Image: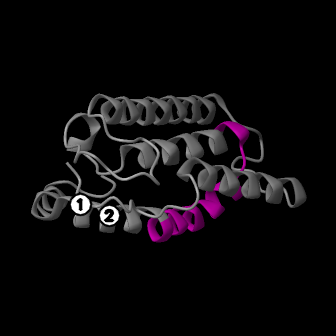
Amino acid sequence: MATDPRGPNIRFPPPLIFAVGWLLGWWLNRRLIFEIDGAGPGGVQTGLGLLLGAVGLGLMFWGMITFVMARTPVIPHRSARALVRHGPYRATRNPMYLGLTSLYVGLALVANAAWPLIVLPVVLIVMTTYVIRREEAHLDRAFGADYHAYRRQVRRWL
């Protein structure tokens, strides 16, 4: 059970950060067209985009279901009640964010829009700075040595 009731102090929901980044990239693409493929998205590009989108959605939902089954909040501004290490959390400490990233890239491929891909590093920097680091500090306060061991065993992304 977590001993830190303060929570991670996350101000913006992570899906909103990804959505704002993608929409900014889409808006830029409407102003200054920058396509991935000037001939339009081919079958391979579209197929890869759909695959990445489906994998991203699947990974997000698997991570969410794993949290629900562990009876810990999915919403990141709430205090963690359990350190989840099973399911997708065996391979990555952030499967939901990895899923959002995969979905983001998949949508850019299907839309044939390069600007969202250019904006993605900014999205990931914002996520790391304002979400992930705060979550990690919260988990460190709440779970101490158990979280330290988990961090040594499982990478942040992959």
Q: Is residue 3 above or below residue 15?
A: below
Does the magenta-highlighted stretch encompass residue 119?
A: yes
Mark 2 Cα within 10 Å, few/some/many (few <14, many 20+)?
A: many
Badge 1: residue crowd in 10 Å (few <14, some 14–19, many ≥20)? many
Of 46 and 38, the residue lying toward us:
46
Residue 71 on image: x %, y %: 30, 34
- The residue that disc 1 covers is 142
Q: Nearer the viewer, residue 56 or 109?
A: 56
Q: Are marks 1 and 2 in contact (CB under 8 Å)?
A: yes
Q: Quick check: 121 left or right of 112?
A: left
Tell me where residue 153 appears, x and y as whole percent. Answer: 13, 56
Instruction: Count up the numbered dots.
Output: 2
Q: Residue at x 38, y 63 (%)?
A: 6
The magenta span reads 110-130
Three-letter amino acid code at disc 2?
His
Residue 24 lies in magenta, yes or no?
Answer: no
- Seen at 60% across and 52% down, the residue is 18
Q: Residue at x 50, y 62 (%)?
A: 127
Foreground residue among 131 and 157: 131
Disc assigned to residue 138: 2
| Most frequent secondary structure within the magenta stretch | helix
Identify the amino acid type marked 1: Ala
Q: Is residue 23 left or right of residue 81?
A: right
